[in-house]
Amino acid sequence: MSGKSALIYSPDFSRYSYGAEHPFKVQRYRLAYELIQAYGLTRIPGVRLCQSRPIAEEQLLTFHSPDYLAQLKEFSTAEEPRADFRYGLGDTENPVFKGVYDWACLGTAGTVEAARLVAEEGYDFAFNLAGGWHHAHRNKASGFSYLNDAVIAINVLLAKGKRVVYLDLDAHHGDGVQDAFYDSDQVLTISLHESGVYFFPGTGFENETGAGKGVGYSVNIPLLEHTDDALYMKAFDEVAFPLIAAFDPDVLVTQVGADTFRTDPLTRLEITTHAYSYIIRKLKALQIPWIAVGGGGYDIMNVARAWTIVWAIMNGIDLPPALPSSFIKIIRPLGFPHKMLLDAMHWADEDDRNRALDAVEKSVAAIKKTIFPVIIGEYGQTSGK
């Protein structure tokens, strides 16, 4: 591989607001970038720091409906609060604020630029911090997501004849991306997430395996609350990794949400930096051109630590566990107690863990029965490129 990597970042990522009481805080982008800089990770040979290029509406229309885009654009310029629940706009989940269309376009453009750099300029890795809006649907905002950047960028890759794996590590099911490619055999979607039985968005079960040509190309591993590092790695190792290796895509697109972490206020998984780092290292070892996009995370220090780990591993850097003193000076006035990049491994209580283990084993068995014959049977058992 060429050794070229691109980090997509703009100060404008943090210049909008969902509202003081909303759990999604745009300051996460600045904090993640500050930690990446504090470790010196923007000054590595082969690294390029990029901003988004303007995105054309015709690119958005490769997924989103014209009427939805028109409504989002109109609401974005309004001086007074607006709402249209047909499109999921204006409720407490997906507030409409001035400039929301421009802000959503900015993040989407970053993921499209990452796809261009990988597909056209031979970059090995590109990471858009402000991507990962996996809940947006064709004509509806959902789950804090207004435009589905991953779908639009994958459409760019498909137009260039690329086959793609989309891997979603967010605690919430990547429903918008799954739906977009549910009948396609050119995109293999894999999502590890907290079970939708009692958790948003209420989808992502093992029997959601695709339709038409896409049967066998949608893979879901629903996890019970208290799933810890060992169980998360087991699910990845027994399902996601062999499927990615067998499918052997031209491009890997990974949503790297940090809301799986055990201290996230909105979720009930118990992942630490140990499992997160382990999975990112195994993906790097596949040597597949790789686009990473942000995603969830509602403890913004978790987000900063997680995405710094992603960027470091992409670039082959082992980081010291202590946070840089320059970064501690930034976070101390904000009241953050964190002093370390890495967490100690955590084990759930025995009864909770046994229930979570049973759920993982059930999912693995179901997927091996329904998905493996399609993907591994079609493409053959491989160990990657």
Image (tube, rainbow, N blue to C red):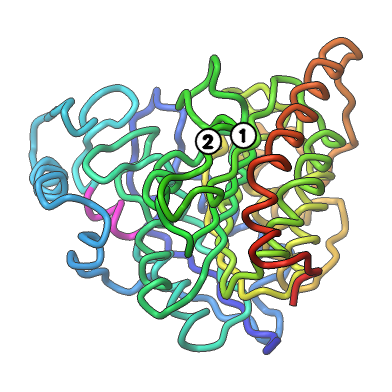
Task: Determine whether 356 is above or below 4 in the image.
Answer: above
Q: Is residue 143 magenta?
A: no
- x%, y% of residue 355? 80, 15
Q: Going by the image, does 120 lie left or right of 89?
A: right
Q: Going by the image, does 28 lie left or right of 336?
A: left
- x%, y% of residue 188? 54, 56
- x%, y% of residue 224? 69, 22
Q: Quadrant of the C terminus?
A: bottom right
Q: Quadrant of residue 286?
A: bottom right
The answer to whether residue 14 shows anywhere in this view is yes
Q: Which residue is mark 2?
A: 173
Q: Going by the image, does 56 lie left or right of 280?
A: left
Task: Determine whether 197 is above or below 7 in the image.
Answer: above
Task: Determine whether 204 is above or below 233 in the image.
Answer: above
**Residue 193: mark in rendering:** 1
Q: Quadrant of the N terminus?
A: bottom right
Residue at x 28%, y 58% (from the top left corner) = 105
Q: How many C-alpha atoms fall within 10 Å of the one at disc 2: few (<14), some, or many (≥20)?
A: many
Residue at disc 2, secondary structure? loop
Please tell me which of labels 2 and 1 falls first in the chain. 2
The stretch of residues the image draws in magenta is: 101-106
Residue contact at pointers 2 and 1, CB within 8 angstroms:
yes
- Total marks placed: 2
Query: Label 2 to label 1, Cα distance in Å?
Result: 5 Å
The answer to whether residue 31 shows anywhere in this view is no
The furthest residue to the top: 351
